[in-house]
């Protein structure tokens, strides 16, 4: 099926005419980016909390077994980050695994993950460091719980007034924590501004995209199976819809987003606007054939529609044919990347290794 056929009847808004006038240059697109950011903040995710006055990072003890991690081929550490706003502060813990020998073009991942174990089913740490990459890991619920309680963790300080229609949801708060870890990485010897990659699976893939859209320090955004309200076109989407996601997880978003349940056509944007804010930096979309809840075809369409923005910057975007790809497929030639692998919703080793290979090819 051709892309145009797949888009028929979806009535997707044109990202090159986000406010009426058609955009034809990268300068014009840069000039509308703040308004697109405002739109997404006010209608979907809420405003990401501001940068703190300062951060402190304290090293925490690790146990003897962790010290022997990877037989000495990588150094594992744990840290506690405290962000200060005047006299008030919020803290969370993160870990790092850094190869003993760091290459000059070493990818530096920040993985916002579903657990704090190292390794974890979604983070094959030894394979990552053996492949010459550093990885910093945030356990997302250490930042704030994955529910409607805004009184715990960093949410208590960062989102005091949930009654406001643009108040940040949990995705925005998790994104804020990734930005703080990047603040820390910037102070390290290993820091390379070209090599910062953020990765997350599913709800944390949505978090990854939001972070990259609002923080230009992210050069590679690896959104794994992020689907609804992440990397998938919302209009005409299969599987999960806004009505489902806002019923089950209203706290991921700003209160304003709930009004679009069952009314996708009234959204003044679609998810490719989020991706367009990341272009011309690298977007890596990873999908799974049986992940119909996320809808791999709608994920593909969002990325393909972002192409026009990449082109404004003289970049290739996703190199693809005019069709919806079958499975398995790996499109890794352009400045944007897409894969569809066999299997179900999961962040697999295969996914990691594919992302790593692509990132290395671009460094
Ligand atoms: C599902 C949710 C999806 C996806 C997933 C996950 O239940 O509906 O949008 O984010 O959770 O995070 O695992």
Image (cartoon, rainbow, N blue to C red):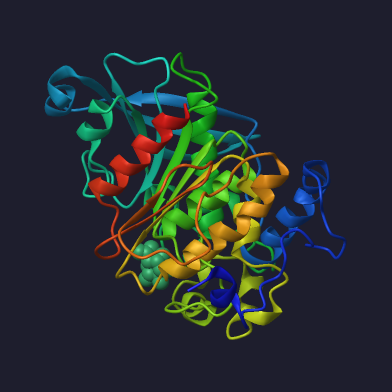
Identify whether 92 is placed above or below 344: above
Which residue sits at x=67%, y=78%? 11
Position in image of residue 352 (x %, y %): 31, 43
Asked whether residue 147 is in view, the answer is no
Which residue sits at x=23%, y=43%? 117
Which residue sits at x=41%, y=67%? 296
> In screen coordinates, is 189 left or right of 102?
right
Identify whether 278 is placed above or below 344: above
Which residue sits at x=27%, y=28%? 131
Q: Which quadrant holds residue 127?
A: top left
Position in image of residue 233 (x %, y %): 55, 69
Position in image of residue 291 (x %, y %): 33, 69
Front in this rendered view, residue 79 or 292 = 292
Front in this rendered view, residue 301 or 42 = 301
> In screen coordinates, is 11 left or right of 250?
right
Identify whether 240 is placed above or below 196: below
Q: Which quadrant holds residue 133?
A: top left
Asked whether residue 184 is in view, the answer is yes
Residue furthest to the right: 21
């Amino acid at each position: 099926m051709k892309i145009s056929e797949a888009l028929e009847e979806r009535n997707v808004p044109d990202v090159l005419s986000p406010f009426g006038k058609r955009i034809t240059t990268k300068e014009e697109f840069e000039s509308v980016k703040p308004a697109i950011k405002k739109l997404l903040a006010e209608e979907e995710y809420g405003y990401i909390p501001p940068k703190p006055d300062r951060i402190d990072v304290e090293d925490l003890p690790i146990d003897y077994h962790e010290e022997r991690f990877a037989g000495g081929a990588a150094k594992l550490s744990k840290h506690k980050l405290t962000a200060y706003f005047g006299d008030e502060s919020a803290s969370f813990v993160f870990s790092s695994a850094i190869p003993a020998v760091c290459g000059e073009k070493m990818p530096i991942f920040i993985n916002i993950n579903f657990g704090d174990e190292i390794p974890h089913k979604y983070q094959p740490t030894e394979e990552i460091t053996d492949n010459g990459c550093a990885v910093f890991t945030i356990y997302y619920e250490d930042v704030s719980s994955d529910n409607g309680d805004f009184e715990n963790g960093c949410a208590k300080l960062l989102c005091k007034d949930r009654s406001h229609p643009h108040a940040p949801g949990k995705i925005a708060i998790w994104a804020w924590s990734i930005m703080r870890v990047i603040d820390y990485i910037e102070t390290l010897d290993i820091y390379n501004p070209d090599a910062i990659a953020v990765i997350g699976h599913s709800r944390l893939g949505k978090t990854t995209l939001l972070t990259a859209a609002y923080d230009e320090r992210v050069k590679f955004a690896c959104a794994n199976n992020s689907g609804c309200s992440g990397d998938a076109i919302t209009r005409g989407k299969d599987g999960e819809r806004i009505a489902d996601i806002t019923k089950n997880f209203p706290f991921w978003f700003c209160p304003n987003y709930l009004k679009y349940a069952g009314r996708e056509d009234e959204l003044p944007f679609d998810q490719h606007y989020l991706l367009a804010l990341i272009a011309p930096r690298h977007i890596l979309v990873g999908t799974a054939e049986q992940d119909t809840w996320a809808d791999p075809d709608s994920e593909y369409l969002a990325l393909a529609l972002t192409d026009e923005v990449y082109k404004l910057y003289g970049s290739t975007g996703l190199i693809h044919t005019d069709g919806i790809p079958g499975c398995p497929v790996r499109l890794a030639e352009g400045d944007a990347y897409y894969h569809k692998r066999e299997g179900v919703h999961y962040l697999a080793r295969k996914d990691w290794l594919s992302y790593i290979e692509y990132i290395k090819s671009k460094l």
